[in-house]
Amino acid sequence: MALEQPNAVEEFEDALRKLGWLSAYSRQVLITRHLLRNLATISYPDDLPGSVSGEFGLDLFRCSITILSGVNRETKQFSSPYDPQDRPDTHHLAFRRKNRIFSASIASGMPDVHFHIGSGGGFGFENSTEATVEDRLLSSEILAVSKSVGLTTKALADERVEALRNEKLWQQQESEAQVDAQKFFDHWHEWAGKNGSFWREWYQGLLDGEPLDWRLQRRVARIDDTIWQAGIEAVATEIEKIRTIFDLEKRIGELKTDLRRATSDRHGIGGNNPPEMLDNAPIAKELLIVWQPLGDLSHEIAEGKPDPSRLQIIIEKLGSALNTGFAWCLKKGDLIVDTAIKWAVPTGGTGYLALHPEKLEAVIEAAKRLLGVL
């Protein structure tokens, strides 16, 4: 994406006007990326009044993850007003429409950004008449997203901006502001301590163009207002639970896939001993010892509010299945090197569990971690 322009300030002004023609979603994503590149503006949170810097940083991250993950398209917690409407030269990100958080503007005759803190304060700067790398990046992203887009083709811009979310924040450009933005995170992380580890990983993923799984990000964005308002520790505790459940779901999915594959290997197509049909997936009777508690586990975590006592019972059932497999392994001794033996005796799927314990072990360990954070 070329950034060299004959007049970067005029290009920035033209880009902001084009931004006003895009959908709210496209505007918000583009301005959010600009916000995250301009954390250099608050690289030294001591310049902010009192202790607002830490919680203010958390507000910025909440706004950004809610918009970038797509959750805001449904909740509309954050808006992107601009003024004046007939010739927009200032775009805002605001919470609940009235509480402004960040703005990008050409109103002063040159590009500037401003972070709004509460109703009466703020922190920002006006750039020189030579636009910064960050200004030129925003211009280029807006122009690329809005190319050939009209009133009836705004969906095209939405598709482009959705792909843009996976691009590095600075793409291939070098900028001192990127170093300063990371300094802001270093300073903020000192304030947050272990409660800020998720956000550091989250921001690094955006810098590298390798964002955290968007499904995980959407779950974090959906954390209830009351938890966000309770502060960084409450948010961190909830994120840990969300990540643990998310990891457990992945482990369960991997094991279920393995069990279906094992069934296919055992029965083949048109076998004389057809497998059971559970959840629209054929599973060998020998493997019900693990499939049924897996189903119970999936159901228990489905709503994100698992009951510790029921979770403990399921963990014990899965552990029993694993131990049964190990017992079979000891009984058969060296014969298990012949993988055909795993189906020679249909003893509760123990042959499979003995030869392939790692995925079941991963599920059990993930479930235990979840039990530990409940």
Image: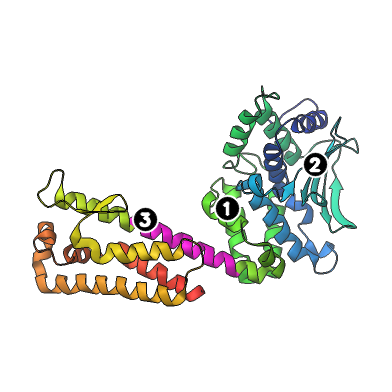
Q: Which mark is residue 337?
A: none
Asked if disc 1 and disc 3 are in contact, CB closer than 8 Å, the reply is no
Q: Residue under circle 3?
A: 253
- Amino acid type assigned to the residue bearing label 2 in the image: Pro
Question: How far is mark 1 from mark 3, CA to CA?
Answer: 19 Å
Q: Is residue 247 magenta?
A: yes
- The residue lying at 17 percent from left, 50 percent from top is 265
Relative image position of residue 245 (x, y in whole percent) = 47, 63
- The residue lying at 12 percent from left, 47 percent from top is 271
Disc 3 crowd rating (10 Å Cα; few below 14, some 14-19, many 20+) is: some
Q: Earlier in the sequence, mark 1 or mark 3?
A: 1
- Amino acid type assigned to the residue bearing label 1 in the image: Arg
Q: Secondary structure at mark 3?
A: helix
Q: Nearer the viewer, residue 286 or 31?
A: 286
Q: Earlier in the sequence, mark 1 or mark 2?
A: 2
Relative image position of residue 101 (x, y in whole percent) = 79, 52
